Image (cartoon, grey):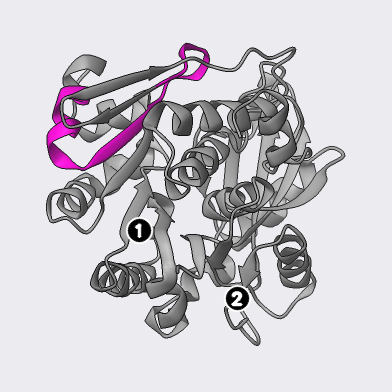
Amino acid sequence: MADYDVLCIGNAIVDIIAQCEESFLVENGIIKGAMNLIDADRAELLYSRMGPAIEASGGSAGNTAAGVASFGGRAAFFGKVSQDPLGEIYTHDIRAQGVAFDTMPLSGRPPTARSMIFVTPDGERSMNTYLGACVELGPEDVEAEKASGAKVTYFEGYLWDPPRAKEAIRLTAQYAHAAGREVSMTLSDSFCVDRYRGEFLDLMRSGTVDIVFANSHEIKSLYQTASFDEALAAIRKDCKIAAVTRSEKGSIIVRGDQTVPIQATTIRELVDTTGAGDLYAAGFLHGYTQGRSLRECGDLGSLAAGLVIQHIGPRPHKNLKHEAEQVGLL
């Protein structure tokens, strides 16, 4: 019996989310729709220029863990915060969602990570992330029992930026595979893919990663092609399962010769795309660890993504298990 359904590994980041006009991005040199890594000084500057903001515990894999727990799954998380007010907020929030989070916090500097997210009127989010304590996550933070006991380990491509996190992920993958478990990753961001294309492909081709989550931009970046079909044909050969999201076009799941198209959930209003991919992965992995078909996994992912983009913030405001039951998916 597995102790957990999904173990997520990621950057433990407090999101500070504010709405802004397109002109604000231009005036402040912010790349729209991307995750921009910034230093402490830039973080202070942007924070001082922000309008009214919502603070919420985020970080890609943390959002996925919260989503799995909201579906009623057993989720755990590895991520590094500091012993400071933001670290306390993060720890409280993720545990309150029902996620097992026991990584030892840092005492002293650097402080807990924060991401200033600017949401333009079209719902697109532009992230400016100071990684802070996140970069201190290392192999000593790997809890062997959780790594061996989770049905699927899931990590974010963003973790390839801090070097010691790579060691932590490889060690966790060793524990997972030794116990007959599976490992999954999200490509996270097309800029992230540009930085680590070779390493990401090696993770897939070496069998370190079994299941890959990506969006259409990231998969095309991975294979350096303008053709979505070419990229999809390539990823079939490189991993066991790939789930590729396409915004309002839904998603496509491939496994070997199998292709499963998934429709996007109909929404009333697009408010904020923050967390859409993270929650899609949560729905998919919840279904997958419960033995559901790929179509059912995709439908659960679509539902979760569709719900989270209709409000500000990266984590579900509604109980996902209840919502899935209402539409007959669980």
Q: Give the crowd class for mark 1: few <14, some 14-19, many >=20 residues within 10 Å.
A: many
Between marks 2 and 1, how big is the CA–CA gap? Answer: 19 Å
Q: Is residue 98 left or right of residue 156?
A: right
Q: Give the crowd class for mark 2: few <14, some 14-19, many >=20 residues within 10 Å.
A: some
Q: Is residue 180 left or right of residue 165?
A: left
Could one spot residue 73 in this view of the protein? yes
Q: Is residue 104 above or below residue 5?
A: below
Task: Identify the residue under disc 1.
Answer: 160
Residue found at the very far right of the displayed protein: 52
SS at badge 2: loop
Q: Is residue 66 above or below residue 148?
A: above
Q: Which image quarter: residue 99? A: bottom right
Q: x%, y% of residue 21?
A: 73, 21
Q: Is residue 87 above or below residue 131?
A: below
Type of amino acid at the residue the image marks with label 1: Trp
> Which quarter of the rendering shows the N terminus?
bottom left
Q: x%, y% of residue 191?
A: 37, 39
| Residue in the foreground of this view, choosing between 43 and 227 | 227
* In magenta stretch: residue 242: yes
Task: Identify the residue under disc 2.
Answer: 110
Give, as a single range, the part of the protein colored magenta. Answer: 231-251
